Each structure stands twice: as C-alpha cells, then as structure tokens.
Image (cartoon, rainbow, N blue to C red):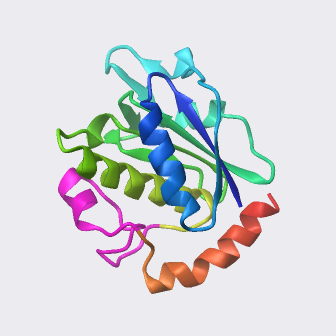
Amino acid sequence: MKIAILPMGDVPRGSLTDLSDALAAYGLACEVRHLAELPPAARDATRAQYDADAVLEALPRPTGETLLAVTTEDLFSGAYTFVFGLATIGGGRAIVSLRRLETADASKMGRRFRKEAIHELGHAWGLRHCDEPGCVMAFSNNLAEVDAKGDEPCARCWAILPFALARASHA
C-alpha cells in the first residue's frame, strides 16, 4: 500500500519525514507530495477553523494509494469543536492537524502526530474506533487520551487490517 502525504499549508518538513520513516517501518511506501493549499471555502472565519469534512471532500479521490493530508490549521467537524484529524471510513482519504497536538516537547509532539496519523489512516482503510484503550484506533477526545494510547493497533484491529488494506487497494 502506498501512502501519499500531502502537506497543506506551513507544515514542518521534518515532521513529514519523521512520519514517512515511521510508516516505512510498517512496510508502507510513503511519498511526500508538493505543498497544497487548504480550500478557502472550507474556512469558517467566525470559528477561525477549517471544516475537516469540507477539506476531505475537496481532496482528490486516490486510486491505488491512500492520501493523508497534514496541516497546522485548526480543524472542526460537525458538532465537535475541534478534531485532531478526520477520515472517510474506507475511502482512502484522511487529514491530520498538528495544531492541537503541539507541545514544547518535540519527541512527545512526534509521538502524538504519529498516533493520530496512524489512527486516521486506519479509518481510511476501513477500521472503526476500538474499545481497547491502548489501541491506536481508540477514540481520543483530548491530549491525555492521545498520550495514553499506543501507536499500534491492538490484536483485534491488526487481524482486521489485512482485509481492510485489501479492500482499500482495490478502491
């Protein structure tokens, strides 16, 4: 499975390289694409945030690869005042925001970004939220929950993943 990482806005190149290297450790081929802009129509000026659903809808529909957009802008979705990221379940497209993952500790920030990127990629491949607290597919409503979960799927999600990847690669 190939992952196209699409920086949208002023995303630190080192963060993208670190993520690409981490995903390569799972045997996933990654390509960091050229900078793209967030769709202006997705910006809600009153909230000073981007509608993650609108951004996802504006992304190109991938064929034979998964598209992971990364931004430093703040995102929201529906009734959620903010989201760390969002994906179309089984749709091969996802977005992650670094904005609310920020901390002075660069190592911790990298772990948070990796967890949320893997989480959203899992959704893009068809995985749903998991009830196992340590699973990367566990829902995170705040930074403490992001920090508490692991950066890999639990055994149950790992067992589903090959089937999800097979479906995604034929989408």
Place of residue 108 in the rendered image (x, y in percent of width and height, measured from the top left) = 24, 51
Which residue is nearer to you in this view: 110 or 47?
A: 110
Rendered view: 89 above or below 16: below
Rendered view: 99 above or below 144: above
Q: In this view, does 74 lie to the left or right of 128?
A: left
Rendered view: 140 above or below 157: above
Query: What residue sits 56% from the left and 68% below the top?
Result: 26
**Does the image show residue 96?**
no
Query: What residue sits 34% from the left and 79% below the top?
Result: 132
Quadrant of the snapshot with the C terminus: bottom right
Query: What residue sits 37% from the left and 73% below the top?
Result: 135
Place of residue 3 in the rendered image (x, y in percent of width and height, measured from the top left) = 65, 51
Q: Is residue 16 left or right of residue 101?
A: right
Start-end of magenta stretch: 129-151
**Does the image show residue 170?**
yes
Place of residue 70 in the rendered image (x, y in percent of width and height, measured from the top left) = 49, 37
Place of residue 141 in the rendered image (x, y in percent of width and height, measured from the top left) = 27, 54
